[in-house]
């Protein structure tokens, strides 16, 4: 099993996870207006295939009890259940986040949903596996949170017509954020203690948990969407063009590459899950960068929206820089 033997290697994996988690949603745009529920089936397929691939390659270096297949054979049922639960919780959180974006817009969904997830997830992970100076960790998180909130203000100013934010939309954001903040601590527990799963094994079982949960939840949302769209049938999935299926599978594989990298980095010496998770959740700003630089989401926006963008990235880079220094400064 490959495990980074230096902080530099672990940092590379954490930054890779941040980039992947902030980039996979681009494949939804490349799939060209495919309803998220249909895209999600291919996303889950990509997640499972990629996690299995990483397990039999990087997770199987050096055939021993820590190898991918050996660990799956020897890990106990409690840790399997925790990994499955982690995937199920993430699945519901991910779907609710997308729904809340469609109802309330990014200006509400991201600061509420991802903001709660970032703070709650970092706090829970630190309590489960303390590593690093807590003051430095939470100062870094605070700077990233400030960047997310400022980014939300910019998006809100960009909208010529503000959406009416209902109590239901806010409730969806809050539930999504709480669940998104809880999936990673479950994964941390699944990789800790006697009979635990390795990061590669937990990634595979996590993806199975996503799939098992997605079957009833995603199908129910197809029949009874919580947004304003019409119901969707499985027949529509079969009629999608091949390139739409391709981009869905690629999207799942990209998220899995980021997830596996983050899980592996969290077990590295000096890093810990709190720092690894917090850096990974910087994905919000990566997605914002794609929106600004590639998809030109702020083209033609009011000046008072565009002038906030540089400050967003300054705050984000400051918070990210502090988080990356936590393991070094905590020695």
Image (tube, rainbow, N blue to C red):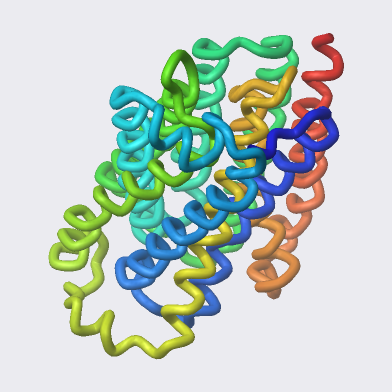
**Image location (x, y in percent) of residue 212:** 25, 50
**Image location (x, y in percent) of residue 26:** 58, 68
Res. 98 in view: yes
The residue under the point 42% across, 79% down is 245
Please tell me how many numbered marks the rendered image carries: 0
Q: Using the rendered view, name the quadrant where residue 86 is placed.
A: top left
138 or 241, nearer to the observer: 241
- Quarter of the image for the C terminus: give it: top right
**Image location (x, y in percent) of residue 72:** 41, 37
The residue under the point 68% across, 52% down is 19
The residue under the point 73% across, 10% down is 133
Relative placement, left or right, of 156 versus 324 is left
174 or 70, nearer to the observer: 70
Q: Is residue 51 above or below residue 74?
A: below
- For this orientation, the residue located farthest to the front is 63
- Quarter of the image for the N terminus: give it: top right
**Image location (x, y in percent) of residue 241:** 39, 90
Relative placement, left or right, of 96 versus 266 is left
Q: Is residue 60 above or below residue 271?
A: below
Res. 164 in view: no
The residue under the point 57% across, 33% down is 64
Q: Using the rendered view, name the quadrant where residue 87 is placed.
A: top left
């Amino acid at each position: 099993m490959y495990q980074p033997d230096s902080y530099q290697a672990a940092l590379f994996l954490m930054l890779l996870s941040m980039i992947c988690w902030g980039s996979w949603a681009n494949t939804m745009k490349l799939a060209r207006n495919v309803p998220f529920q249909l895209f999600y089936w291919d996303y889950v397929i990509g997640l499972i295939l990629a996690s299995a691939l990483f397990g039999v390659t990087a997770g199987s270096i050096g055939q021993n009890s820590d190898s991918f297949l050996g660990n799956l054979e020897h890990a106990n049922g409690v840790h399997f259940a925790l990994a499955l639960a982690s995937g199920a919780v993430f699945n519901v959180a991910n779907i609710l986040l997308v729904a809340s974006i469609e109802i309330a817009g990014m200006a509400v969904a991201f600061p509420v949903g991802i903001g709660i997830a970032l703070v709650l997830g970092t706090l829970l992970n630190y309590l489960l596996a303390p590593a690093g100076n807590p003051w430095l960790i939470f100062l870094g998180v605070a700077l990233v949170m400030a960047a997310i909130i400022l980014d939300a203000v910019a998006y809100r100013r960009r909208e010529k017509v503000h959406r009416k934010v209902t109590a239901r939309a806010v409730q969806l954001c809050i539930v999504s954020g709480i669940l998104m903040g809880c999936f990673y601590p479950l994964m941390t527990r699944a990789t800790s203690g006697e009979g635990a799963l390795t990061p590669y094994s937990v990634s595979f079982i996590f993806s199975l948990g996503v799939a098992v949960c997605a079957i009833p939840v995603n199908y129910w949302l197809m029949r009874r969407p919580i947004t304003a769209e019409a119901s969707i049938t499985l027949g529509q999935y079969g009629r999608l063009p091949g390139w739409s299926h391709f981009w869905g599978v690629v999207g799942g594989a990209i998220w899995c590459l980021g997830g596996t990298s983050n899980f592996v980095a969290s077990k590295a010496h000096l890093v810990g899950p709190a720092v690894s998770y917090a850096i990974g959740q910087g994905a919000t700003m990566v997605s914002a960068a794609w929106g600004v630089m590639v998809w030109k989401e702020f083209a033609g926006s009011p000046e008072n929206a565009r002038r906030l963008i540089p400050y967003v990235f300054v705050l984000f880079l400051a918070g990210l820089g502090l988080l990356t220094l936590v393991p070094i400064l905590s020695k």
